[in-house]
Image: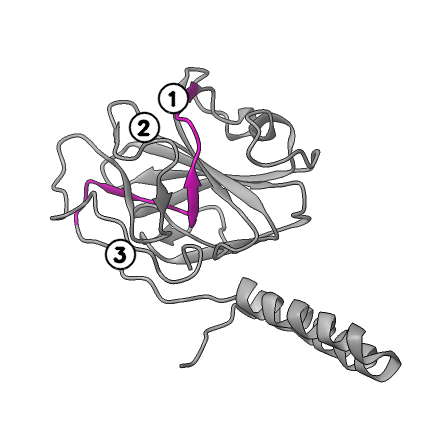
């Protein structure tokens, strides 16, 4: 079975493979360890296809992983939103999750902003405020504003995003990747209802994490699927 690989992963995979070849030459036991790491690197950068559910009211998970406790929090100040707390859903990705991120809803990107910062463990609440991040604000088709943030973690040192200001995006579309362990925060518009709970595992581009008021929702919106391994 073919394993799709994200394009960001190929240079790193090539580096792992080259190092492994040298390890085999220097000392075979090192080569065995290098082979295991190379296989893990290939697995990390896997990029499986996802099928977004229909329903204009569905907000989809932007990342694979585990939902952290839901809180009311201020959105990132760089997005220049109203300084009012919004429901924040945070998804923590460990090193075994698929790390390709996907757009949570249909709409238009209003603003993006990269901010350097620290590298605290991404499961800590303070990571949202202090860690390196890339924030995006989008206008939904119904006029609501929704924000989502890629956040670097303890091991992650690189955030990639293809989003541009003014870009029209569709839910479930790939927009970036974070390597290697990290999180994505999403700030819901007022009136939106969260459909997930802390500890739940979600699938990027498929799991419905919230519903917008006055919109139609897909059948079975609360169902999740394990895509093999650890949510991959």
Q: Residue furthest front?
A: 29
148 or 1, nearer to the observer: 1
132 or 135, nearer to the observer: 132
* Quadrant of the snapshot with the C terminus: bottom left
Q: Secondary structure at mark 2?
A: loop
Q: Secondary structure at mark 3?
A: loop
Between marks 2 and 1, how big is the CA–CA gap?
Answer: 7 Å
Which residue is label 1 attached to? Answer: 86
- First reached walking from the N terminus: tag 3 or tag 1: 3
Task: Name the mark nearer the viewer: 2 or 3.
Answer: 3
Q: Is residue 68 magenta?
A: yes
Give the extent of the magenta segment.
55-72
* Quadrant position of residue 16: bottom right
29 or 122, nearer to the observer: 29
Which residue is label 3 attached to? Answer: 52
Between marks 3 and 1, how big is the CA–CA gap?
Answer: 25 Å
- Pinpoint residue 192: horizontal percent, then vertical percent: 25, 28
């Amino acid at each position: 079975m073919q394993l799709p690989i994200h394009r960001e992963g190929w240079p790193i995979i090539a580096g792992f493979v080259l190092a492994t070849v040298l390890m085999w030459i220097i000392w075979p036991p090192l080569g065995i360890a290098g082979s295991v790491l190379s296989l893990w690197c290939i697995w990390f950068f896997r990029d499986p296809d996802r099928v977004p559910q229909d329903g204009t009211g569905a907000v989809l998970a932007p990342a694979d992983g585990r939902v952290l406790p839901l809180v009311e929090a201020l959105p990132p100040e760089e997005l220049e939103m109203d300084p009012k707390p919004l429901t924040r859903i945070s998804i923590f990705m460990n090193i075994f999750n698929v790390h390709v991120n996907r757009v949570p809803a249909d709409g238009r990107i209003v603003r993006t902003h990269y901010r350097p910062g620290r590298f605290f463990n991404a499961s800590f609440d303070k990571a949202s405020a202090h860690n390196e991040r890339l924030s995006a604000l989008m206008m939904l088709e119904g006029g609501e504003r929704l924000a989502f943030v890629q956040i670097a973690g303890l091991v992650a040192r690189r955030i990639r995003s293809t989003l541009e200001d003014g870009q029209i995006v569709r839910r479930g579309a790939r927009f970036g990747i974070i390597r290697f362990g990290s999180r994505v925060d999403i700030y819901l518009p007022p009136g939106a209802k969260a459909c997930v709970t802390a500890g739940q595992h979600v699938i990027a581009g498929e799991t419905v994490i919230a519903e917008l008021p006055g919109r139609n929702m897909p059948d079975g919106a609360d169902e999740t699927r394990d895509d093999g391994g650890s949510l991959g």
